[in-house]
Image (cartoon, rainbow, N blue to C red):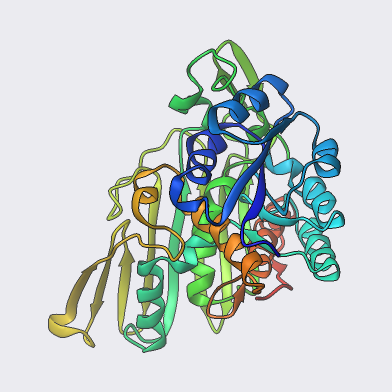
């Protein structure tokens, strides 16, 4: 394997232009990554991104890119509904993969992807792996393993926002930034897969795989507006799930893309917690802090200011947008160059963790439709 990974960026929309492409063209990564190609179904956008970020080639056809471009890996930043098909084609071609969240739209797809990647010996890193690696996450897991708050009883965590149609990046009318977000409200996308996935990765990396899920879910806003276009909402935009980790440890998880503004310890709109309560105390996780209330810490209360440091992010990258996704991409690069299994942390394999989170979301929707608690079968 060459010491420089030749990578293609598939999907040149908001996340790629704001984050992925700028990161991958910084001078400090050129000894490990070469931007081999940009690909987007909007030909002019793919071409303009190729020119702006210095890629070698551009394509508007994914199959043609896989057949013709000299690439070792792809980062897939297309609508979630396309992830599975594009990932399976890359695996068949022996091309390593980074997948933006969520890895696939359904649990069935995730199972097939995991098996296919194993058979072809293709390395896969699925975002948001960074949530398990954050200093705050590691600290909370340490507290729980040490028994600082005793037996865990329950957890509350969630994420909400206003919708991608209001994203400032999309306001202009030029070909690069006039990126239609309609896909986000179609079947297979929505806030659980786009927002709450972060919090599910975080809390399961702390408490481990969940065993059962129940929930309520529905479409609260039937229509959205993007500029002069009316978007019909097809996927649930307001969801609350209940998780069971066994031994009477429960959690409430929510995901919403309805007008909401929550102010909490995070001081960050839309994110609540995680708050974890146990038999001997509780933990409140903030955006850059961890608060512990327990008789097992000095004075009964302790607050630790944490840094949002990640293993594959250095220097200027922390000042750039989407550095957490860049972290996952560079994790893949490291695994390719050094022939390592993509393990996020604590022997958690990236694709297996992502698959479990997808099963929670997928079966959470089933639980909502049927009114019946669903048993979870995957682990990591």
Compare residues 89 and 376 and report the one nearer the observer: 89
- Residue at 46% x, 62% y is 312
Asked if residue 147 lies left or right of residue 358, the reply is left
**Furthest-top residue in view?**
228
Q: Quadrant of residue 231?
A: top right
Residue 190, percent from left and from top: 62, 41
Q: Is 269 placed above or below 223 here?
A: below
Does any portion of residue 350 appear in the rendered image? no
Q: Quadrant of residue 103?
A: bottom right
Residue 122, percent from left and from top: 77, 64
Does any portion of residue 98 appear in the rendered image? yes
- Residue at 35% x, 84% y is 279
Residue 227, percent from left and from top: 54, 14
Quadrant where the image shows the N terminus? bottom right
Q: Is 323 placed above or below 117 here?
A: above
Compare residues 156 and 332 and report the one nearer the observer: 332
Compare residues 222 and 231 and report the one nearer the observer: 231
Asked if residue 321 lies left or right of residue 71, the reply is left
């Amino acid at each position: 394997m060459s010491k420089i990974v030749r990578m293609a960026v598939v999907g040149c929309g908001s996340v790629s232009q704001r984050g992925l492409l700028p990161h991958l063209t910084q001078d400090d990564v050129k000894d490990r990554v070469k931007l081999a190609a940009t690909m987007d179904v909007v030909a002019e956008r793919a071409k303009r991104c190729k020119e702006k970020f210095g890629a070698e080639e551009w394509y508007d056809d994914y199959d043609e890119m896989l057949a013709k471009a000299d690439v070792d890996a792809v980062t897939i930043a297309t609508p979630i509904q396309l992830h599975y098909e594009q990932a399976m084609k890359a695996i068949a071609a022996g091309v390593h993969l980074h997948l933006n969240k969520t890895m696939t739209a359904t649990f069935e797809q995730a199972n097939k992807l995991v098996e296919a990647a194993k058979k072809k010996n293709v390395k896969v890193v699925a975002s948001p792996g960074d949530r398990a690696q954050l200093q705050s996450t590691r600290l909370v897991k340490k507290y729980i393993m040490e028994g600082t708050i005793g037996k865990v009883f329950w957890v509350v965590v969630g994420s909400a926002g206003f919708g991608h149609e209001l994203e400032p990046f999309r306001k202009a009318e030029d070909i690069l930034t006039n990126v239609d977000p309609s896909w986000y409200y179609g079947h297979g996308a929505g806030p659980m897969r786009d927002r709450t996935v972060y919090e599910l990765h975080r809390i399961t990396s702390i408490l481990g795989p969940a065993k059962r899920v129940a929930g309520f879910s529905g479409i609260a806003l039937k229509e959205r507006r993007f500029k002069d276009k009316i978007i019909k909402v097809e996927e649930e935009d307001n969801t609350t799930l209940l998780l069971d980790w066994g031994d009477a440890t429960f959690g409430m998880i929510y995901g919403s893309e309805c007008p909401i503004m929550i102010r909490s310890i995070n001081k960050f709109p839309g994110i609540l917690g995680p708050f974890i309560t146990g038999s001997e105390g509780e933990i409140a996780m903030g955006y850059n802090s961890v608060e512990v209330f327990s008789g097992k810490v000095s004075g009964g209360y302790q607050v630790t200011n944490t840094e949002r440091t990640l293993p594959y992010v250095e220097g200027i990258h922390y000042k750039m947008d989407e550095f957490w996704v860049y972290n996952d991409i560079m994790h893949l690069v490291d695994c390719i160059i050094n022939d390592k299994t993509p393990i996020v942390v604590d022997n958690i394999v990236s694709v297996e963790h992502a698959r479990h989170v997808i099963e929670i979301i997928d079966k959470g929707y089933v639980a909502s439709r049927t009114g019946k608690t669903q048993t979870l079968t995957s682990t990591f």
